[in-house]
Image (tube, coloured by chain):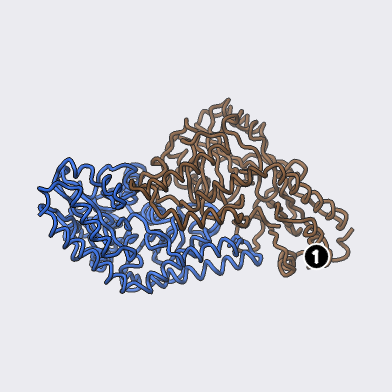
Chain colours: A brown, B blue
């Protein structure tokens, strides 16, 4: 139940990638037959990815993942589009927060963090005020679904505010590509980022959508790949795998949502029936359907909860996997609540989970945690 | 005969990657069992790569490829190590040259290009003079084997000059990792870069060696992966595939060199026997054993040489694949010679070529080119 950290690769995607590794050795930049064949496959994959988000094919560029895509959007907006101010939130993924630290330090970019409410929603009234009060070229970076608590941003509302005030808008959509509808032909967004390994595709490949009006240059300089927007020989098997994974996920989008939401809601209900004094983070009813982040009251057993769940064969996380190699807590929960003694668990589910697993998780928690915590 | 552009993935590497895709779904940053298993595999791969170049494991970082690695070395040396001047050559790969353009433009870095001789060797006396004359913190970036003409740099000599004068030294070793010995424990080098798809590994993964004395930060900001040196969920199948490919190539290094050198020398001899007025670029006898870059005199047939070879099922290139999607010529040959009418062909061979193919290439060239060119 840690599918927000990463996902196993769909067997059909593995088949696509293995075929690509075996059959298409060419460098897509070569002009001979092997190169042209590889190029054609990449452009077909681009069509798939662009189509999935309502973009034109000229607006989608393949990268090594969501983190690189975000680095490219934020840093090159500052470098190439004269962005002097970035408005974000303290609940963003580290790839955003650490880019903002770097931009403050090396470029003197002004960085503002919006207030967030108890459910993790950034204050859009504050955003509106900030956008109106200052003539500086501004970029807003707010994620679509928070990766730890699932809170969903109203993308259309933020996009509309940004458009009104002439601000650029980047959204880290890594947790929602393939699970929530994204349509840049209707939602005016400047930059959007995706990562294949979050939707049953391979690790090491992702994409960035760059709205055609925003002429940024490459973040990784070198060859003319990706129409001079991202140098380096293209990761052909990864790109084909990502496109295949996206196709598969979109074809099953609605049925997966119903199924996973059902599991997640059942987990939440069974937890509430089984334990006292639970605290939930985010807003499960209105947040990403795959996520449930709850905490248990302080106890010696709770301190070792992740470890004991792991021993029992249950994989969950205390926060984002990316945050640390150790159980170092969560900057998201730190920003939201002031009770570090409580032990939070992020459950993130997928269509690969079952109702039996939900029962197993609840029963295991009941075995681990002290009786006083139980309802 | 275009194996300098890219290589097919070794079947044993494909098996390793397919197994990784199937069996190791974890995010290496997760602390549960799947995560720890993935982490252990990555650290094993790091040991392999570090061992292959005489580095310690703390000095090797996985990236999306050679181009990203070079961006990281050059740009972060300027950002984090106070490098104010970079000395390079006009024959470097575009990933170096375009990084230097960016650094000049955005950071005001002083960039100097050494004179090169007719065989593509940079003037090391000039380098010595430049290093001695200026107190600015300097980085030297010179590639080990030129990817178009095969010219091999004397790494030890350049490293010694740099060390004497306190300059940093980056070498693009993308064409020599696995084919020539690289030992950073004996050659004092600051940064070295590799790309798996050049040694029968997968596209989309590479590495950077960063000498332990040079404390640069990440180029891609975000999570704490790669000990805070390269954010983004690790490309586990790619990293394992790269390590496997490197192991295989090193185990066969000497036998492959003898075999490929034999093929390349036979090709050069057969071409000289078959055609008049050939011009060779670089220094085949002392350059990379896999490369032969020759030109034919101007003729209508020579203009269409690449296309006609392609039609005959022979894949070669006119320059680096990365340079362009089209047959746009070569910045390397432009810098070396002033005879754009001649049609140059880069033959780059591997252990997958045969002597029959050498004959086939020569015979096909004899069919395509006008009789007057033949010897």
Q: Is residue B220 above or below residue B166?
A: above
What's the residue at 56%, 69% (across, down)?
B40
Q: Nearer the viewer, residue A121 or B281?
A: B281
Residue B324 visible to the viewer: yes
What's the residue at 69%, 58% (across, down)?
A318
Q: Image quadrant for the C terminus of chain A?
A: bottom right
Specify whether A62 is left or right of B184. Answer: right
In the image, farthest residue toward the right: A375
| Chain holding disc 1 | A
Specify whether B320 is left or right of B63. Answer: left
Q: Nearer the viewer, residue A198 or A72?
A: A198
For disc 1, the marked residue is A364
Q: Position of residue A10 (x, y in %)?
A: 61, 54
Dividing the picture into quarters, in which one does residue B281 lie?
bottom left
What's the residue at 61%, 28% (across, down)?
A160
Q: Nearer the viewer, residue B57 or B355?
A: B355
Q: Tell me the SS state at disc 1.
A: helix
């Amino acid at each position: 139940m840690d599918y927000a950290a990463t996902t196993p690769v769909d067997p059909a995607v593995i088949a696509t990638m293995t075929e690509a590794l075996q059959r298409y050795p060419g460098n897509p930049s070569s002009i001979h037959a092997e190169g042209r064949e590889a190029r054609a496959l990449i452009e077909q994959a681009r069509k798939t990815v662009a189509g999935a988000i309502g973009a034109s094919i000229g607006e989608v560029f393949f990268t090594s993942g969501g983190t690189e895509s975000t680095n490219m959007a934020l840093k090159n907006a500052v470098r190439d589009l004269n962005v002097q101010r970035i408005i974000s939130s303290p609940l963003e993924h580290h790839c955003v927060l650490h880019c903002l630290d770097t931009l403050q330090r090396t470029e003197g970019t002004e960085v503002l963090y919006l207030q967030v409410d108890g459910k993790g929603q950034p204050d859009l009234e504050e955003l509106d005020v900030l956008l109106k009060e200052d003539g500086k070229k501004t970029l807003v970076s707010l994620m679509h679904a928070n990766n730890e608590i699932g809170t969903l941003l109203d993308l259309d509302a933020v996009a509309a505010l940004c458009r009104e005030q002439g601000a650029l808008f980047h959204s880290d959509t890594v947790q929602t590509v393939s699970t929530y509808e994204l349509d840049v032909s209707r939602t005016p967004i400047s930059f959007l980022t995706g990562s294949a390994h979050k939707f049953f595709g391979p690790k090491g490949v992702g994409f960035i959508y760059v709205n055609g009006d925003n002429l940024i240059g490459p973040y990784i300089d070198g060859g003319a790949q990706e129409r001079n927007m991202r140098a380096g020989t293209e990761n052909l098997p990864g790109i084909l795998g990502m496109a295949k994974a996206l196709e598969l996920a979109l074809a099953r989008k609605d049925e997966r949502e119903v199924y996973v939401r059902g599991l997640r809601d059942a987990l939440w209900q069974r937890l509430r029936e089984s334990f006292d004094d639970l605290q939930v983070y985010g807003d499960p009813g209105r947040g990403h359907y795959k996520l449930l982040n709850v905490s248990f009251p302080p106890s010696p057993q709770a301190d070792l909860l992740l470890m004991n769940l792991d021993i029992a064969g249950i994989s969950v996380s205390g926060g984002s996997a990316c945050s640390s190699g150790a159980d170092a807590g969560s900057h998201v929960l730190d920003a939201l609540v002031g009770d570090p003694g409580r032990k939070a668990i992020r459950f993130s589910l997928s269509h690969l989970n079952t109702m039996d697993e939900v029962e197993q998780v609840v029963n295991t928690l009941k075995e681990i945690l002290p009786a006083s915590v139980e309802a």
